[in-house]
Image (cartoon, rainbow, N blue to C red):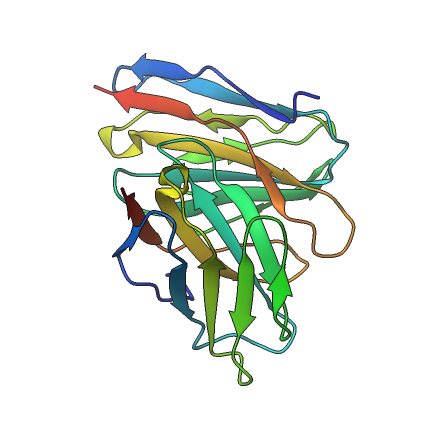
Amino acid sequence: NAGVTQTPKFRILKIGQSMTLQCTQDMNHNYMYWYRQDPGMGLKLIYYSVGAGITDKGEVPNGYNVSRSTTEDFPLRLELAAPSQTSVYFCASRGDRYLQPQHFGDGTRLSIL
Amino acid sequence: DAKTTQPPSMDCAEGRAANLPCNHSTISGNEYVYWYRQIHSQGPQYIIHGLKNNETNEMASLIITEDRKSSTLILPHATLRDTAVYYCIDNTNAGKSTFGDGTTLTVKP
């Protein structure tokens, strides 16, 4: 059982480039989340989704976009990379049953130079 | 902004109980208390959750005060592998969670 899988694990981008961080889960979870974590800090919610076709903004959505065309996949798009987006990005999912905890992926470490 | 308040760091001797406090000053009636931990730079791992009663599982115990404004996570016999950042969060079933900066627990030999 793979759980939550994030790709790539590491990436270096130049300022102004774009990329998509991939997240897929095999647990048939409707709830999915994207967080960013800056060095020495906690996690900040970027976007989340409560099911296919439904997404909503979190605390820090500016500079990012998401889509949710399937239950399994929740990609995060950076359109114009900026140095302030250098961070570790975590994807998580949660089951529908009441009060289920979140399951996290191993993260994508992104540097923008 | 995070809804919970935790001390930035704590130390604990190996084999002793680690007691990690959390203040939930704005918790509402339908919000549960969840605890997660993050080892090194891995993704956070769920530990335990509760509403108002004390809870225990194979990893830890959770004590929630009667007014629900504070909670304590207890690791009964801390090991070196319990060194991690511990997060407490208030969460409804809607699932939108706010993580603060957590408490860095260092278990020392």
Vertical placement of A100 versus A27: above or below?
below
Q: Position of residue A99 (x, y in %)?
A: 70, 56
Vertical placement of A29 versus B60: above or below?
above
Image-based side of A13 in relation to A90, left or right: left
Q: Position of residue A106 (x, y in %)?
A: 48, 26
- Front in this rendered view, residue A61 or B17: B17
Image-based side of A92 in relation to B6, left or right: right
Determine the residue positioned at 59% across, 55% down: B48
Vertical placement of B79 versus B5: above or below?
above
Q: Position of residue B79 (x, y in %)?
A: 40, 42
- Front in this rendered view, residue A69 or A97: A97
All told, the count of numbered labels is 0
Determine the residue positioned at 62% across, 75% down: B52
Determine the residue positioned at 41% across, 49% down: B78
Location of the C terminus of chain A (image quadrant): top left
Vertical placement of A22 versus B98: above or below?
above
Q: Position of residue A92 (x, y in %)?
A: 57, 37
Image-based side of B101 in relation to B66, left or right: left
Residue A13 in sight here: yes
- Front in this rendered view, residue B58 or B38: B58
Location of the N terminus of chain A (image quadrant): top right
Q: Residue furthest bottom?
A: B67
Residue A55 in sight here: no
Determine the residue positioned at 38% across, 49% down: B15
